[in-house]
Amino acid sequence: MHDALTGLLRQAPVDRETWRSWWDQLGDGRLDQTQAVALLASLTSRIPDHETLRHLLDSLAERRSPLAVSTPWEGTVNVVGTGGGPRTFNISTASAFVAAAAGVKVVKTGSRAYTSSLGSVDLLERLGVRLTSSYAQTEDTLAAYGIAFAGPFVYPVQLTRLARTVAPLSMKPFGRFLNALGPFLAELPVAAQVTGVSAAAPLDTLRALAASHPGRRIWLTANDTGADELLPFATNTVHGPNARDRIIRPGQLAPADGSFGDLRPAADPADAPGHFLSVLAGTAGRVATRTVCLGAAALAVASGTRRDWPSAVALAEHAVRSGAAHDLARRIAEASKTATPSKKPAVAAHA
């Protein structure tokens, strides 16, 4: 049994050298399905301390090739969530479109569903929006539309090998761990990242990881409902760098009426694209509009596009009312019809 697995089973710290050995043996084919499944099950049943996760992330980061980008993407923000909260439509994906329509440069990362019925990648596929397949394509898409949906190339290839090793078993049973760590796995030269954290994820552990993450400013958002989104009818906390937190109370930036009943997803996944487009058009109800605009405002402030929250909310609301957000989604879907298909992700972060 590998030392990484025995350490996790003993609830002992696992250092970087041990993780390096794990990835070496996985790559060489010396680890069988039984050990791979046992490791994922251990990580999922009890997410380890932040130092073990930091060593895991570092062991993956050092195996990456240098980023194939000439300059960092200044003013660009990544948005991703941990999933696992109350069932809603794809709020963060809608917020990404609204923010981009308002002039914010946004890269969205996500996955197929682990804990929900429809992940962001599932939704985008139904909308006809393709993922980008390289950093160059992502830059070009950002330049053309102000938003890009990054494909699996941003994630460590070792995770694909791990998924193949456990096959034919699905990775879905390990969604709790993959969702929690997923927001820290994507390699993107963005300036900021906004990550929604549900009650199913270990917030304190993720805060420690965010504080030690190099190269980007990370905000973690949480609220008293357990959702991984900012909600106008909840008490929200935006956990920023250096313990600079912000509380957003019900009614502070938007009217506080509403409930999860106003945010429920389409009953039939086949109806999800139409419902999603109605959200972007502002015709899915006032609470849905307020919610996606609050999320879009967070992206505007985190990216530096706006300095204060009230003006950021107003900017997002205008992007919906003017039809810009809805039109943006339709234009990207039309352009995707002639684009080169990208590969489907085996493992990625939830959204």
Image (tube, rainbow, N blue to C red):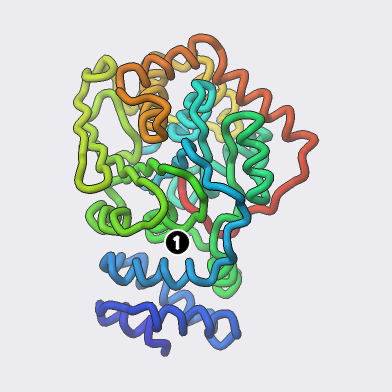
Above or below residue 237? Residue 197 is below
Q: Describe residue 82's horizontal placement relative to residue 93 as left or right.
A: left
Image coords of residue 282 (percent x, y) = 48, 14
Secondary structure at badge 1 equals helix
Image coords of residue 94 (percent x, y) = 49, 29
Q: Describe residue 162's horizontal placement relative to residue 247 as left or right.
A: right
Image point (53%, 42%), residue name:
73
Q: Describe residue 49's horizontal placement relative to residue 124 as left or right.
A: left
Which residue is disc 1 drawn over?
173
Image point (55%, 20%), residue name:
325
For the residue marked with disc 1, what is the amino acid? Pro
The answer to whether residue 46 shows anywhere in this view is no
Image coords of residue 201 (percent x, y) = 30, 53
Image point (45%, 29%), residue name:
95
Res 226 → quadrant: top left
In this view, the residue in front, 119 or 302, is 302
Image coords of residue 214 (percent x, y) = 38, 57
- Disc 1 crowd rating (10 Å Cα; few below 14, some 14-19, many 20+) is some
Q: Describe residue 226's horizontal placement relative to residue 129 as left or right.
A: left
In this view, the residue in front, 213 or 197, is 213
Quadrant of the image for the N terminus? bottom left
Image point (52%, 47%), residue name:
72
The answer to whether residue 31 shows anywhere in this view is yes
The residue furthest top is: 322
Count of numbered tags: 1
In this view, the residue in front, 263 or 162, is 162
In this view, the residue in front, 105 or 278, is 105
